[in-house]
Amino acid sequence: MDRALLDAYRQQAGDIHAPAYMRLRRAIRESVEKGLIGHGHALPSERELAHQLEVSRVTVRKALVGLVEDGVLTQRHGAGTFVSERIVKPLSKLTSFTGDLRARGLNPRSEFMEREIGEVTPEEAMALNLSPGALVVRLYRLRYGSDEPLAVERTAVPQDIIADPAMIEDSLYEVLESLSCHPVRALQRLRAVNFNAEQARLLGVPVGSAGLALERRTFIADGRLVEFTRSWYRGDAYDFVAELQDET
């Protein structure tokens, strides 16, 4: 077993109120976030982890399953469990770009092409349920993870929610949190696309490369719409996953 993971798990031992599987899950996540376990790295088998950590295999399995669902780990049939190289984004969880990348030990940042206040467009008015003439904070930015461009993003937020676009330096959701406008629900639409010339130039890929377009409208607890975002993700870096259940 990696010494870093063993040490990280031992550091969690003081949290006697948390179940063992949660402590192990945190230890693995923190090891990945700190770069102590690299992307693509293979974890020991469930049996070996259980033996070294002196826990049951059920505990190990529960810890790993949660991290696979979050996209931190991937499991390959017959090969084992690995730290994810591709970014796996669950569609069933409302998370931010910044939060997703930090959870995987990547350093998120944004390069702004636009960060301004403007009159709402017809498309934005319909998406955000705003009247003609209303003002929105409009963002157009390139999103990076560890200095690699991963997504192009256009966002509109009602100006009565965020008064000054300069407040948004990186994470929109962190700003919304600070304003007591925590997003609680979102409607999303995902489709396959081919990048146009501008998107390809910004992302550093050939024109026509495969990508994933995600459209999101986000709501806060009182039902107000606070975000309309269209994002174009690199198809060679992202997987979007959804958990399906039989309702019968």
Image (cartoon, rainbow, N blue to C red):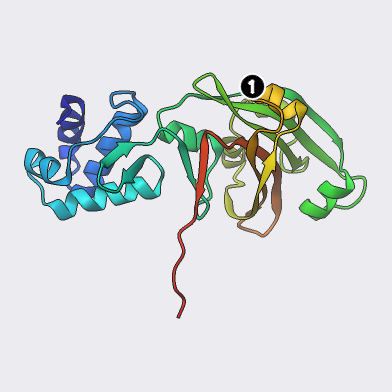
Q: Is any atom of residue 17 visible in this view?
A: no
Left or right, 97 with respect to 105, comes to right
Left or right, 130 with respect to 39, comes to right
Would you place residue 94 above or below residue 168 in this image? below
User: Residue 16 at what x, y percent from top left?
Assistant: 16, 46
User: Residue 68 at what x, y percent from top left?
Assistant: 35, 47
Left or right, 243 with respect to 156, comes to left
**Disc 1: which residue:** 204
Q: Residue furthest right?
A: 133
Q: How many numbered discs sit on the rendered protein?
A: 1
Q: Residue furthest bottom?
A: 248
Could you say which quadrant of the image residue 222 lies in?
A: bottom right
Q: What amino acid is found at the position of numbered circle 1 in the picture?
A: Gly
Tell me the residue at 74%/32% (across/down).
Answer: 139
Tell me the residue at 14%/41% (across/down).
Answer: 49
User: Which image quarter holds the N terminus?
Assistant: top left
Callout 1: helix, strand or loop? loop
